[in-house]
Amino acid sequence: MPDRIRDHAGHGATTVAARRRRLRADRARQLADLLRRQILTGGFPDGTVPHETTLGTDYRASRNTVRQALDLLRAEGLVDRLPGVGTVVVARKYPHGLDRLMGLAETLREHGRVTNEVRTMGPAPAPAPVAERLGVQPGADVLYIERLRSLGGLPLSLDLTYIPLDLGTRLLGADLENTDVFRLLEAVTGRSLGHAEITLEAVNADAHSAAVLQAPRGAALLMLERLTHLADGRPVDLEFIRFRGDRITMSGLLRRSL
């Protein structure tokens, strides 16, 4: 075979192999998504994932694809393989709704008691973006609060909160370790909260966040920015909340409107 033909044939073989690997990786990712959903919704009530052969039959996937999908879930810390047992669920994610304005303790009340470690609390000059969103003068003092929020001793989120000082001073003696800020704001104002503007994005854990949340540095976090208003429209609470991406899942009900 001439060298030119031989080289072309070799290149083609390599391309076919690469396409097969990519196809298997795509299928493994798709299967991992389906299995993740099962894990998060209690689809494996006994905590054991079906055998690889069973998964292959149920999802029409090769054994290599199934193993690759389980490897992805293992890397996320959701499952592990135990000798003589098989693949078991070792972690869970807690649901956080995005279609209702609720504090974390209210959101997760069915799953246990949320506790707060108040790491920092006190007046601080408002940075310009904070002042603008809260409707106060740039540089004016606001109440700044940093809290680590945990469920059953498991760190879930690091919350950075800014509150106008006329309301914030009334929170200084409040039980922030056991009570959501939302409930406290409604108590001190005598008014209900109305609505919130939210932005959700993925960020990597910086050294400080990773240490506080007991997560690997650079781990994926869900960062929720939320500006909450009273029912009369006044902005009263600007929060930057970093959730551990391996312990919280966001969900909501969306309706199509054109």
Image (cartoon, rainbow, N blue to C red):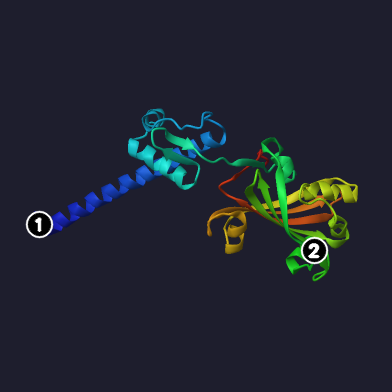
User: Residue 59 at what x, y percent from top left?
Assistant: 41, 31
Q: In the orientation shown, which residue stands out farthest toward the right?
A: 190
Location of mark 2 (residue): 122
Mark 1 is on which residue type? Pro
Tell me if residue 121 comes above or below residue 18 in the rendering: below
The image shows residue 161, relative to residue 196, as above or below, that is below
Horizontally, is 141 left or right of 98 in the view? right
Return the residue nearer the eye: 47 or 200.
Answer: 47
Please name whichever residue, 22 or 125, is drawn nearer the observer in this view of the structure: 125
Residue 2 tag number? 1
Residue 235 lies, in percent from the top left, at 81, 55
In the foreground, 191 or 217? 217
Assess disc 1: are there few (<14), some (14-19) or many (≥20) residues with their C-alpha within 10 Å of its C-alpha: few
- Disc 2 is placed on an element classified as strand
**Residue occupying image coordinates x 77% and y 47%:** 178
Please say whether residue 100 is visible from this viewpoint: no
Q: Is residue 138 visible?
A: yes
Q: Quadrant of residue 55?
A: top left
Please report contact status of discs 2 and 1: CB closer than 8 Å, yes or no. Answer: no
Name above or below for residue 181 compared with residue 31: below
Between circles 2 and 1, the one closer to the viewer is 2
Estimate the x, y position of residue 73 in percent, counting from the top left: 46, 43
Q: Residues within 10 Å of mark 2 (few under 14, many from 20)?
A: some
